[in-house]
């Protein structure tokens, strides 16, 4: 379940804002600030306490003088409370995928005996851009290998011709003596 912040589309009357909403927003911020501060202190002591919306909601229920606590949606909708939560949250961004093994040229190292099913699964997990980059890299490597193959075949043909000439020359010397 992904949590997102709501944006207010309508304005409350100014008297209602001043009399009701502003004190509620301030109360929410104060309770969230107390809860976050308590969680930060607890994290300093044990090193493992998470500072997340769920832990803040639990802590606000314990620390709220009214005993109600604050819902996670209230934190998301209150700009001050949300900013304070974001400053101290311990949730980390998703880690990027580990890079594939590459050789010195930066090209992908492909082994002949690799597990085809694992390779297939890895490709299915890639997004379009990663697949296009992989295909371009593979095509480039193929073109380079083809060029090397042509050069090597030229060299082999050249050495075969030299060997035939040397053999012909050697046979002529043997027969001429």
Image (cartoon, rainbow, N blue to C red):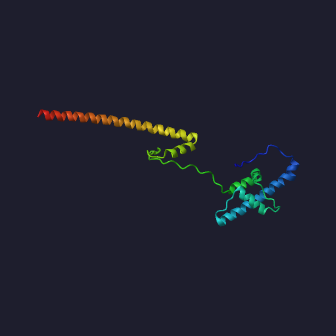
Residue 156: quadrant of the picture: top left
Number of marks present in the image shown = 0
Say left or right for 74 vs 166: right
- Report the residue at 49% width, 40% height from top: 137
Q: Position of residue 130 (x, y in %)?
A: 55, 41
Q: Position of residue 21 (x, y in %)?
A: 84, 52
Q: Quadrant of the C terminus?
A: top left
Q: Position of residue 54 (x, y in %)?
A: 72, 57
Say left or right for 137 vs 75: left
Q: Is residue 155 depicted above or below 52 in this figure?
A: above
- Report the residue at 28% width, 36% height from top: 159
Q: Is residue 64 depicted above or below 123 in this figure?
A: below
Residue sitting at the far left: 177
Say left or right for 155 vs 175: right
Residue 122: quadrant of the picture: top right
Residue sitting at the far bottom: 45
- Report the residue at 72% width, 60% height from top: 36
Give the camera-side residue of 114 and 49: 114
Q: Position of residue 169 (x, y in %)?
A: 19, 34
Give the camera-side residue of 1 and 78: 1
Give the camera-side residue of 175 and 31: 175
- Report the residue at 41% width, 36% height from top: 146
């Amino acid at each position: 379940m992904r949590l997102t912040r709501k944006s207010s589309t309508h304005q409350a009357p100014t008297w209602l804002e001043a009399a009701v909403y502003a004190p509620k927003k301030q109360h929410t911020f104060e309770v969230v600030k107390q809860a976050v501060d308590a969680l930060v202190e607890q994290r300093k002591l044990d090193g493992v306490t998470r500072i997340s919306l769920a832990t803040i909601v639990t802590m606000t229920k314990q620390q709220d003088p009214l005993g109600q606590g604050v819902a996670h949606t209230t934190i998301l909708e209150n700009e001050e409370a949300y900013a304070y939560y974001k400053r101290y949250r311990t949730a980390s961004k998703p880690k990027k995928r580990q890079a594939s093994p590459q050789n010195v040229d930066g090209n992908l190292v492909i082994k002949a005996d690799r597990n085809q099913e694992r390779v297939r699964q890895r490709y299915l997990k890639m997004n379009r851009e990663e697949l296009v980059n992989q295909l371009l890299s593979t095509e480039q490597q193929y073109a380079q290998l083809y060029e090397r193959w042509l050069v090597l075949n030229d060299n082999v043909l050249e050495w075969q011709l030299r060997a035939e000439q040397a053999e012909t020359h050697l046979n002529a010397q043997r027969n001429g003596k």
